[in-house]
Amino acid sequence: MKETLEKIKAAAESALNAAADESEIENLRVKYLGKKGELTAVLKQMGSLSPEERPAMGQLVNEAKQKLETLIADKKSRLKSKATELKLKAETIDITMPAKEIKTGGLHPLNHVVNDMIDIFQSMGFDVVDGPEVETDYYNFECLNVPADHPARDMQDTFYLAENLLLRTQTSAAQIRTMENRKPPIRVICPGRVFRADEVDATHSPVFHQLEGLVVDKGITMCDLKGVLEQFAHEIYGSDTKVRFRPSFFPFTEPSVEVDVSCSECGGKGCRVCKGAGWIEILGAGMVHPNVLRCCGIDPDVYSGFAFGIGIDRITTTRYKISDIRLLFENDKRFLEQF
Ligand code: PHE
């Protein structure tokens, strides 16, 4: 009996050592310690022993049982920690791997510039107003002192959508809408997209952007216009920038001027950016024509005003030294990511 016990113990031990998973261990437990197990069978044979032999043998069987139980528990816990170890290994995050790039968008250079322009004029007390891109002939030309058949219409090659409907050629249309809706004092800017049937080249695009300004009040003079535009130029290009008024013609202003700023690239000496002139034209302006005020129900004997229209694209290309206006509209990410 003792021998049988030793054999069972040895076989169980080696089987347990070889067991590779929990179900194998469980099978072994049942095989040796279960109700019909081999060790249990030995215990059942105890009855056939003499009373003198029984205690010693009983102790041996119990020891063997305990031994097997601890072996099983050990093996189980070893398997468990091995499994945990493997799981952890499989789930390790390789922190040296490059992370997935999070792509964020950015403002278009034109929007950077418009936002800055709005900030500058708002700090001088201007309100921002909006106007439709599809305009009537009346707002875009007629009430701006450009009647039908007036030769000044040739200055702005127009996309007509219908007899009296067109894509606005200038933000000046917003002046009229504002003066119809507000009483002086008026101080507004209107930034927006405008359209002209121009051929595309490095400096022309059929879609471009203007920022219109309008001030109407009692006693407004050209000095006010110059002061506002100088302040604007200093903030955009730097405080040593010079501003120059050249006489010009617009049907809706009298007198009218083209406004140049000293070239920020060469400081006025002449370079590639200003094409040797030392000056860059950035806007048209003038004192609001009495006919325009009258058309909007404002008495030109009581009120006067000035207006200006700034080319936003030109401000953008000079500010960022962009050599071709087409780059602003091609949506090439390699270009746009630089701003
Ligand atoms: N609307 C003019 C243009 O597009 C610019 C301008 C605006 C001139 C306001 C005078 C006053 O050329």
Image (cartoon, helix red, strand yellow):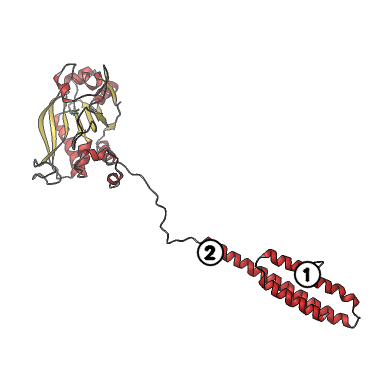
Q: Residues within 10 Å of mark 2 (few under 14, many from 20)?
A: few
Residue 316 figure quarter: top left
**Quarter of the rendered structure image containing ligand 1:** top left
Kind of residue sitting beneath label 1: Leu
At mark 2, the secondary structure is: helix
Mark yes or no: residue 188 visible.
no
At mark 1, the secondary structure is: helix
Disc number for residue 158: none
The residue drawn where x is 11% and y is 28% is 248
Question: Looking at the picture, how far across and down is residue 289, in whole percent?
Answer: 16, 22
**Left or right: 319 as drawn, with respect to 52:** left
**Left or right: 247 as drawn, with respect to 57:** left
Question: Looking at the picture, how far across and down is residue 69, in whole percent?
Answer: 74, 72
Residue 64 figure quarter: bottom right
The residue drawn where x is 67% and y is 73% is 17
Q: Name the image quarter holding the N terminus.
A: bottom right
Question: Looking at the picture, how far across and down is residue 243, in whole percent?
Answer: 13, 38
Compared with residue 81, is residue 277 higher up or lower down, i.e. above or below? above
Q: Looking at the image, which is closer to me, 301 or 269?
A: 269
Q: Are marks 1 and 2 in contact (CB under 8 Å)?
A: no
Which comes before the other along the chain, label 1 or label 2?
A: 1
Residue at mark 1 to residue at mark 2: CA–CA distance: 35 Å
**Left or right: 84 as drawn, with respect to 275:** right
Label 1 residue near ligand 1, CB within 8 Å? no
User: Which residue in the structure is indicated by mark 2?
Assistant: 89
The residue drawn where x is 79% and y is 67% is 34
Residue 291 figure quarter: top left
Compared with residue 98, is residue 82 higher up or lower down, i.e. above or below? below
User: Which residue in the structure is indicated by mark 1?
Assistant: 33
Question: Looking at the picture, how far across and down is residue 31, in whole percent?
Answer: 76, 68
Kind of residue sitting beneath label 2: Lys
Compared with residue 24, is residue 169 higher up or lower down, i.e. above or below? above
